[in-house]
Amino acid sequence: MSKKLVKREITDAVDFLLDDTGTLEQGDIQNIEINLLENYHDHPFTLYTGKRLDDMVESIKENGILNPIIVLKKEDGAYEILSGHNRVNAARLVNLKTVPCIIKENLSEEQTYTYVIETNLMQRSFSDLLPTEKAFVLKMRYEKIASQGKRNDLQKDINNLEQGIIEKESKEEDKTDSRKVLGKEYNLSGASIARYLRLNELSDSWKKEIDNEKIGLTMAVDLSYLSKEIQEYLYQQSEELELTLKPSDTKALHLMNRQEELNQEMVTAYLLNLKKPKIKEYQNIKLSRSVYKKFFHDETKEDVEEIIEKALEIYFKGYTDK
């Protein structure tokens, strides 16, 4: 297989996609009406936008679809797209009536997922994926490893993360099974993989926030331990109150939730407290030059402080007597 085609190590999860020459199997190609094509029901990848989409549209205008898409035939006569969502999206923008397709039937759920995930990874590097896309890919690979009954060293990292513990990994430590497989395949540490896996527990609103780089990975992980209902409530209330959460806030909410599962009232109380103006215990106040010259001339610093203190006592005494 050409090294240019594959941007990471392809594992046994995609062996059935390849023929004896190491290229994607083709099979019979049929032109299918574009209105019969449906997006995969659980498609984890974001469609191209901007220049990348524009380039694809122009290419299809000029050359048509050169690489057939792969579809799964459904019982109702429609076809579910397994590979080629972006090409179909661009074809719709070009107003194509039919699309060249390789039709698959009677695939298991695992085979279906493999087509959806691995064909995407053949077209773009894992490092190019959005955080939530990486999370979904790692979840599928992790579940495959776990289902094969291998000793799951990654579970230690997952358990540590749940307790708020991230251990530094020793280079001499022998990583085996799940951590070794995923770490080698995606060039990530066990702790990093554990963090990404948590993103699958985010609500839709917060998934968009991390994909749009509005929040960081650490904040997203903390939020993932809240129920999705509370996550959505937190998001909506933060928007209404025009609050931007900080890493210290998501960490505090995570810790609060570990002590007692958060409800809407608790979230509201926390956010309203953030909205209150913070009163400093001590502020170093400076007099402007004009005010200083108006009241003071040759006094020492100690004299000035004493005068100000007495003036404040008189002022506040009169204020409280009203």
Image (spheres, rainbow, N blue to C red):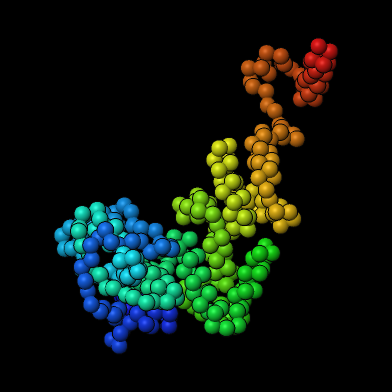
Residue 16 in picture, x, y percent from top left: 37, 82
Residue positioned 80% across, 21% down in the render:
309
Residue closest to the far bottom: 20
Q: Is residue 219 visible?
A: no
Vertical order, 67 against 49 (above or below): below
Q: Nearer the viewer, residue 78 or 169?
A: 78
75 relative to 274 in the view: left or right: left
Residue positioned 37% across, 77% down in the render:
106
Residue positioned 21% across, 71% down in the render:
30
Residue 123 in picture, x, y percent from top left: 33, 69
Residue positioned 29% across, 80% down in the render:
25
Quadrant (top left/top right/bottom left/bottom right) for the C terminus: top right
- Name the quadrant containing residue 133: bottom left
- Name the quadrant containing residue 239: top right
Residue 182 in picture, x, y percent from top left: 51, 76
Quadrant (top left/top right/bottom left/bottom right) for the N terminus: bottom left
Q: Is residue 133 visible?
A: yes
Q: Disc count in the image?
A: 0
Q: Nearer the viewer, residue 100 or 311?
A: 100
Residue 188 in picture, x, y percent from top left: 51, 71
Vertical order, 15 against 52 (above or below): below
Residue closest to the far left: 62
Residue closest to the far front: 76
Vertical order, 254 against 241 (above or below): below
- Name the quadrant containing residue 178: bottom right
94 relative to 195 in the view: left or right: left
Q: Nearer the viewer, residue 78 or 95?
A: 78
Q: Nearer the viewer, residue 322 or 155?
A: 155
Vertical order, 161 against 216 (above or below): below
